Image: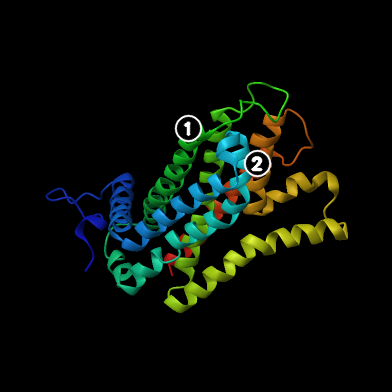
Amino acid sequence: MTDPESVPAESDGAHTKPSAATQIARVVERERKTVARTRTFAILGIGFTAVVLGLAWASGGTSGGYVPTVVGLLTPLELLVPILAMAFGYRAITGDADRGELDVLQTYPISAHQHVLGVYIGRAIGLLAVILASLALVAIAVVFLRTEPIGWYASHASTDSPILFARFAVLTALFAVAILAVAIAISAVAREARTVLALAVATLVVVLVGLDLALVYGLASGVIGEGSLIHAIAFSPLSAYRGLVFESVVVTAAGTGPQTAAPLSSVVGLLTWTIGSLAVATLAVRR
């Protein structure tokens, strides 16, 4: 049966429909509790944190400063963040369908977009808690383990700033919630466990490899001009994230270097993936 707190009910006496914010908040709370109570998510969070800390230390970044740590973590996080986000979201709607809760929800005054948004926000809270806590621990490790003076790699004595690492954390969070939205869409479209798993794996391959290869092919074939490449990378959430980190953190710290991304285009690209995926999930839930 559905948890009574997980869905909005009509108020006693007045029989008035709860507000949209109340309906969404109840679904958010249900998802937050689900994440907190599920041992798999706890194991994933601990494992992710341990791997990130280990990679930061093994790469030597923690002894060099904030920006060297970012450089050392960027490539591994391009792989780990999508996998973690997919794990948090690919069963979210499918689980409701398996338990018959989607059918039950149709009897309550809650719309498809409110349900999807509530699920998304609830899962995002858990996902971001893991990612941001991991990066916060890395930042603390840099404070205690750094052996080189600030700015040893660049001409500006103040370039290696914790503010740059905070930018990296924010961009990583933006990338994570974009992939989470894709996972929610997959969960809504594919209601069966085998189908959703296969689709999740296929989507990861496309996101991690396929879209970047498409950009390379487009550049090599002349479909994408060299001048427009910094805008074209926004079509791939992975490339958009990578370009934003280089443009907003690495190049900024160095003070010079080629432009690696158009920040506005890349941010719009990530937001488009997020909003578009949630729209797909909403349409699928309405079926």
Q: Residue 35, relative to residue 93: is it above or below?
A: above
Q: Is residue 177 visible?
A: no
Q: Which amino acid, by three-letter code, is at mark 1?
A: Phe
Between residue 241 and residue 178, name the one nearer to us. Answer: 241
Q: What's the amino acid at mark 2?
A: Leu
Checking the image for residue 261, the label placed there is none
Residue situated furthest top in the rendering: 157
Q: Secondary structure at mark 1?
A: helix
Query: Which mark is nearer the camera, 2 or 1?
Result: 1
In this rendering, the answer to whether 276 lies above or below 138 is below
**Image disc number at residue 244:** 2
Distance, label 2 to label 1, CA atoms, is 27 Å
Q: Which residue is mark 1?
A: 144
Secondary structure beneath label 2: helix
Determine the residue positioned at 25% across, 54% down. Answer: 8
Residue at 80% in and 61% down: 217
